[in-house]
Image (cartoon, rainbow, N blue to C red):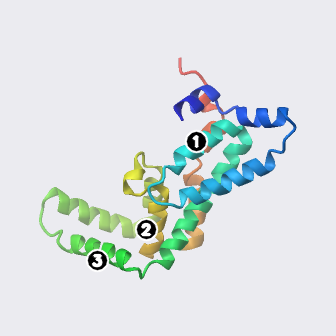
């Protein structure tokens, strides 16, 4: 992945190869974006890293396609989470979280962090979503698929707002690649 980002430079080497042979690139991009969106919806799958590789390999059309497919994949996980809200595993997770919040009544760091997170999550759920989606290492909490699944199961988010907030939230790397920031030398 690092090799593709820094040496392929997002110039679309795969696209150049396909075009040199007179092959259609549209279906390659659409199919790749659809597979990426489905992979992103699965918790703990490092789909974002796969998306970076696709962006580097397919160039500008791939960057735009992956950027557009990212909110779609997260929405798939979100809808799945909404439909699994009554599932026993989700109910147990919600119960354990409620118990943790209720037991946070002393002045220990854990209790203070739990009280802060409960207040902030309820007051600003969409900002929390933006931070979690862009958090390095978010694979530890389930990655995009896990975040989308739990966001849907939580009931804190409206599906349309969830979808619309993800376009700017997931566009940071895409815009940087479109502007050529990854291709510039640092020194």
For the point 77% across and 33% down, the residue is 17
Could you tell me residue 18's position as x and y percent?
79, 37
At label 3, counting other C-alpha atoms closer than 10 Å, the crowd grade (few under 14, some 14-19, many 20 or more) is few
The reply to whether the C-beta atoms of the residues labelled 3 and 1 are less than 8 Å apart is no
At label 1, counting other C-alpha atoms closer than 10 Å, the crowd grade (few under 14, some 14-19, many 20 or more) is many
Q: Residue at label 1?
A: 52
Sequence order check, earlier mark of 1 and 2: 1
User: Marks 3 and 1, Cα distance to the nearest angstrom?
Assistant: 37 Å
Q: Residue at label 3?
A: 95
On screen, residue 142 above or below 151: above
- Residue 3's mark? none
User: Marks 1 and 2, Cα distance to the nearest angstrom?
Assistant: 24 Å
On screen, residue 53 above or below 124: above
Q: Secondary structure at mark 1?
A: helix
Instruction: Locate the N terminus and report the quarter of the image it occupies.
Output: top right
User: Marks 3 and 2, Cα distance to the nearest angstrom?
Assistant: 14 Å
Q: Secondary structure at mark 3?
A: helix
Q: Secondary structure at mark 2?
A: helix
- Viewer-proximal residue among 120 and 142: 142
For the point 53% across and 48% down, the residue is 48
Q: Quadrant of residue 143?
A: bottom left
- State whether residue 17 appears in this view: yes
Q: Is residue 139 left or right of residue 19?
A: left
At label 2, counting other C-alpha atoms closer than 10 Å, the crowd grade (few under 14, some 14-19, many 20 or more) is many
Q: Is residue 3 left or right of residue 94?
A: right
Could you tell me residue 9's position as x and y percent?
64, 29
Q: Residue at label 2?
A: 150
Could you tell me residue 80's position as x and y percent?
52, 72
């Amino acid at each position: 992945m690092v090799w593709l980002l820094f040496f392929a430079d997002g110039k679309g080497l795969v696209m150049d190869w396909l075009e040199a042979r007179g092959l259609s690139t549209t279906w390659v991009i659409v199919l790749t974006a659809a597979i990426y969106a489905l992979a992103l919806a699965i918790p703990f799958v490092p789909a974002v890293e796969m998306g970076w590789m696709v962006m580097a390999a397919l160039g500008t059309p791939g960057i735009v396609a992956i950027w557009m497919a990212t909110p779609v994949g997260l929405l798939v996980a979100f809808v799945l989470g909404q439909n699994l809200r009554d599932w026993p595993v989700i109910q147990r997770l919600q119960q354990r979280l409620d118990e943790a919040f209720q037991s946070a009544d002393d002045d220990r760091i854990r209790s203070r962090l739990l009280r802060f997170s409960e207040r902030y999550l309820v007051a600003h759920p969409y900002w929390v979503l933006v931070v979690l989606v862009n958090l390095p290492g978010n694979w530890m909490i389930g990655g995009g698929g896990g975040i989308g699944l739990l966001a849907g199961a939580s009931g804190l988010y409206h599906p349309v707002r969830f979808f619309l907030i993800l376009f700017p939230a997931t566009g940071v790397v895409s815009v940087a690649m479109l502007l050529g920031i990854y291709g510039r030398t640092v020194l």
